[in-house]
Amino acid sequence: MPPELIHVRPAPSLRRDFAEWAVAQEPKIRTVSTTDFAVPARLFTEVPEPLLIGATVDGHRYVSPDEDQEQTEPADGPDLLGVFQPEREGILGQALPPIPDEAYPPDAKPLPEPDHAPLNDAPGDDDSDSSDRDADTDGESDGFTCDVCDRPFKTERGRDTHRRQAHPEA
């Protein structure tokens, strides 16, 4: 099994220094392009920290442990909304938490409520296809009605799709 390799692109100003370190290793660390080195995973932890500052590692900017510590410490001031908020991660299918009133400027006006279904509904959850929505918005029906629930549809295809998705047992 070949060794796992980590692709490192040192900062241009440190490329020569990185190359000197790479050829001093046993076996020598190989290049994979004119700017990138393939460092075995077992040797990556031995790369001197100053050589990695400003480097790209496997396509991501290298963040030193010191820089990482600075980013995780709380900031001295409020966030962009003007309030202190702990970092939170969104969960698929759950609504976002409300934004505090103090985050809005004094002259802010609320947006009108949407007159459509929430955008986070998964495809297929509404038991219809786009032709169903056209029929609903036009308010017209060409006579294609679901024989199970009597829902009107603009096209025969829309009705058949609805029947397969909403009433698979029928």
Image (cartoon, grey):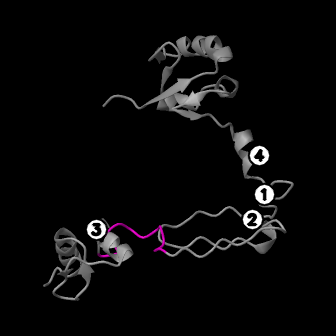
Is there a contact, CB below 8 Å, between mark 3 and mark 2? no
Q: Report which quarter residue 85 is drawn in.
A: bottom right
The alpha-carbon separation of the residues under discs 4 and 3 comes to 53 Å
- Residue picked out by circle 4: 70
Q: Which residue is mark 3?
A: 131
Label 3 and label 2: CA atoms lie apart by 43 Å
Asked if marks 1 and 2 touch (Cβ < 8 Å), the reply is yes
Q: Which residues are magenta?
A: 116-127
- Residue 79 place in picture, x, y as percent: 78, 57
Q: CA distance from mark 1 to mark 2?
A: 7 Å
Q: Name the N-terminal-most of marks 1 and 3.
A: 1
Q: Which residue is mark 2?
A: 85
Q: Secondary structure at mark 4?
A: helix
Residue visible at 63% across and 74% down? 112
Mark 2 vs mark 4, foreground winner is 2
Q: Nearer the viewer, residue 160 or 12?
A: 160
Q: Residue furthest bottom?
A: 149
Q: In what element is the residue under mark 3?
A: helix
Q: Earlier in the sequence, mark 1 or mark 2?
A: 1
Q: Residues within 10 Å of mark 1 (few under 14, many from 20)?
A: few
Amino acid type, mark 1: Asp
Sequence order check: which comes first, mark 3 or mark 2? 2
